Amino acid sequence: MFSEELGVFRAAVETMLTTLKVREVPPEHLETKLKEIAERHLDLTAKLHELSRSNEEPEVAEKREQAAEVIEQGDYEQAEALLAEAVTIDRDRIDQQQDAIDRSKLSIAVTIAQQGELERTRLNYRKAAGHFAEAADRVQSFDSDAAVEYLSKQASVLNDQGREFGDNLALVEAIGIYRAVLDKQPRDSLPAKWAATQNDLGNALWTLGSRESGKARLEEAVSAYRDAFGGKAPRERALRLG
């Protein structure tokens, strides 16, 4: 009786009645609630049939169609499993597409970094720094190690700009980037790289400090050298500071 009135299969009605019982719907609301979920049932199956005809992914379309068919028979548990499989298929496809996108981004970054090396060869250090910064930005979201390498190159060419052309602002920028790199290079896991960056930081600080009044930058440089060399600063620079 209910099946004909509601326009659904008897097995589906039995599932709906079981749901109403489990959810402890009051008797006076049973008929209204049964009609309500029957309408949702019909809308759901109609939508899934429609989607199965329009989806570009055949496997997903098949899972949706199968889900619609088992829903019509009242097998909601199986429908949930089929829809979950459809989601997994789409997620896997997205992951594959994202991997391809990331590979393309990495390829772009590698080429941009070579532009940076070209400009470094031409002594266009500022332009080179821009290329290395862009390369780092391209890969930051999925390859932090590569991003750190490009940032290190950016700092290096800015240091060259400052040292060779008297550009103190470039040295300030290089110092900031070296410190950012140190934050991304844990001393415990990457001791050699960490020490090398500390040494580079010390060099930039020393160059800038030698041009400024006061010893603040030079003291920072000696501290960086000590960190780089395990507590010992290069003798000649420690002596000059003293």
Image (spheres, grey):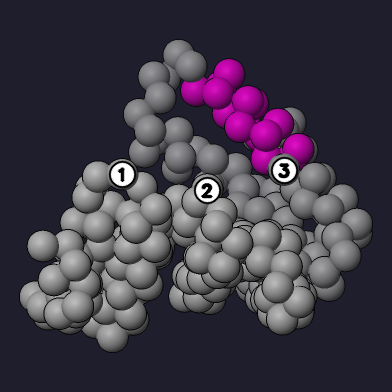
Residue at the extreme top of the image, as rendered: 28
Residue at 21% in and 72% down: 237
Q: Is residue 42 magenta?
A: yes
* Residue sitting nearer the eye, 133 or 146: 133
**Residue 156 x/y as whole percent:** 51, 71
Q: Looking at the rendered structure, which numbered label has been put on residue 44?
A: 3
Q: CA distance from mark 2 to mark 1?
A: 16 Å
- Front label number (2 vs 1): 1
- Front label number (2 vs 3): 2
Q: CA distance from mark 3 to mark 1?
A: 76 Å
Q: Is residue 208 magenta?
A: no
Q: CA distance from mark 2 to mark 3?
A: 64 Å
Residue at 86% in and 60% down: 55
- Name the element at disc 2: helix
Contact? badges 3 and 1 (CB < 8 Å):
no
Q: Return the disc, 2 or 3, that comes first in the chain's sequence.
A: 3
For label 1, the crowd category at 10 Å Cα-Cα, with few meaning under 14, some 14 to 19 and many 20 or more, is few
* Residue sitting nearer the eye, 159 or 236: 236
**Residue 198 x/y as whole percent:** 29, 71
Q: Amino acid at mark 1?
A: Ser
- Provide the residue span drawn in magenta: 30-43
Q: Looking at the rendered structure, which numbered label has been put on residue 213?
A: 1
Residue at 81% in and 45% down: 46
Q: In this rendering, is residue 112 above or below 53? A: below
